[in-house]
């Protein structure tokens, strides 16, 4: 099938790694979008499961699918960067290769960006499992809304307790390409927290963010994905990611005005890392070993001193209260 327009409206970037059993479902959901003027960019991060056999079959049918192999391991962040260098669309979407999207997601989100002139559009997310009855909406917006970038950042960081919040994943968002490229936004490579760093800095710089009602993005939780395996790298990547954010704030002389969002976001991401540990490791001794590693990491990191100065009793209680 040929995409007749030379310049696509939307570039859909898909990092691929060992998702042979899921890539067709992902691609079919994008090919069946109500808007057809798109390009699909697949970046393979050194897969070993012959997923390329399936991708090549799709490339033969659709001339608007581009396929690139990473020269070295980059994880999702590196693969997304490769996609960004080849993207030609006015807007950019990221979809993970084991997930899928509803048929009108891209058109609905593009329409709201066209209408509002916002930098980023955000829709709801449904977490999917092998048992469909376990599916649940993690983020859901009842009505459309156009909010200031500063307000969106507080919803991302959960600095203030509100009924709504914004996920730090990139996949339930549509970005204006000029906004990303004019600000030279890229992902950090080989890091579990590449979404977190990317979105914090994006929302920090966004003028307007459009909230789109409905849950269009289906976030599949497969048992053996990299998000269901825990190691010291999860902890190391958390601190490296926030060191990068802190340096960005310092270098742009905006740390003080964004300190509350920064540490609130750190709490949110730390809670997420601990949640992954709890989910993936049942052995309490091993869990405690990781907790000791985390504490020692904190002792040797300048982030801890500033974080303690930021803390008060209310924040400690809130942090220890599980998120609903």
Image (cartoon, rainbow, N blue to C red):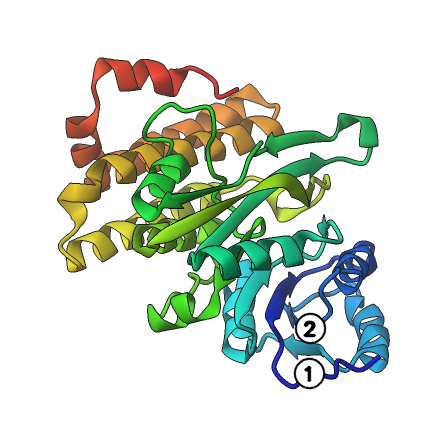
Secondary structure beneath label 1: loop
Residue at the image position 28 percent from the left and 38 percent from the top = 261
Q: Nearer the viewer, residue 84 or 10?
A: 10
Q: Is residue 293 visible?
A: no
Picture quadrant where residue 2 is located? bottom right
Q: Mark 2 = which residue?
A: 37
Q: Is residue 117 visible?
A: yes
Residue farthest front in this picture: 115
Q: Dots 2 and 1: beta carbons under 8 Å?
A: yes
Secondary structure beneath label 2: loop
Residue 5, disc? 1
Percent coordinates x, y for residue 81 in the rendering: 50, 69
Please state if 254 lies on the left or on the right of 176 as rendered.
left
Percent coordinates x, y for residue 256 in the rendering: 14, 43
Q: Nearer the viewer, residue 236 or 178?
A: 178
Please state if 294 lies on the left or on the right of 8 as rendered.
left
Residue at the image position 75 percent from the left and 60 percent from the top = 34
Percent coordinates x, y for residue 247 in the rendering: 22, 55
Alpha-carbon neighbours of circle 2 within 10 Å: few (<14), some, or many (≥20)?
some
């Amino acid at each position: 099938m040929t995409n007749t327009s030379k310049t696509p409206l939307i570039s859909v970037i898909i990092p691929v790694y060992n998702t042979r059993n899921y890539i067709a479902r992902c691609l079919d959901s994008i090919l069946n979008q109500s808007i057809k003027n798109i390009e699909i960019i697949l970046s393979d991060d050194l897969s070993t499961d012959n997923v390329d056999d399936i991708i090549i079959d799709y490339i033969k049918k659709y001339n608007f699918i581009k396929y690139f192999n990473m020269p070295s391991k980059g994880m999702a962040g590196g693969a997304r960067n490769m996609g960004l260098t080849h993207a030609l669309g006015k807007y950019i979407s990221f979809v993970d290769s084991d997930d899928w999207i509803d048929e009108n997601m891209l058109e609905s989100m593009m329409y709201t960006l066209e209408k509002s002139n916002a930098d980023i559009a955000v829709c709801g997310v449904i977490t999917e499992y092998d048992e469909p009855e376990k599916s649940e909406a993690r983020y859901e917006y009842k009505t459309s809304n156009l909010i200031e970038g500063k307000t969106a950042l507080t919803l991302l960081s959960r600095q203030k307790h509100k009924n709504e919040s914004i996920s730090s994943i990139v996949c339930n968002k549509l970005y204006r390409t000029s906004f990303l490229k004019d600000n030279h936004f890229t992902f950090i490579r080989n890091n579990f927290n590449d979404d977190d760093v990317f979105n914090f800095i994006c929302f920090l710089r966004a003028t307007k963010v459009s909230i789109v009602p409905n849950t269009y993005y289906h976030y599949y939780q497969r048992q053996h994905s990299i998000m269901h395996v825990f190691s010291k790298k999860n902890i190391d990547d958390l601190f490296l990611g926030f060191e990068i954010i802190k340096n960005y704030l310092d270098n742009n002389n905006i740390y003080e005005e964004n300190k509350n969002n920064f540490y609130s976001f750190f709490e949110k991401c730390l809670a997420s890392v601990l949640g992954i540990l709890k989910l993936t490791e049942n052995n309490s001794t091993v869990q405690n070993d990781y907790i000791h590693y985390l504490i020692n990491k904190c002792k040797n990191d300048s982030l801890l001193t500033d974080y303690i100065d930021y803390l008060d009793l209310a924040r400690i209680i809130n942090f220890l209260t599980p998120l609903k």
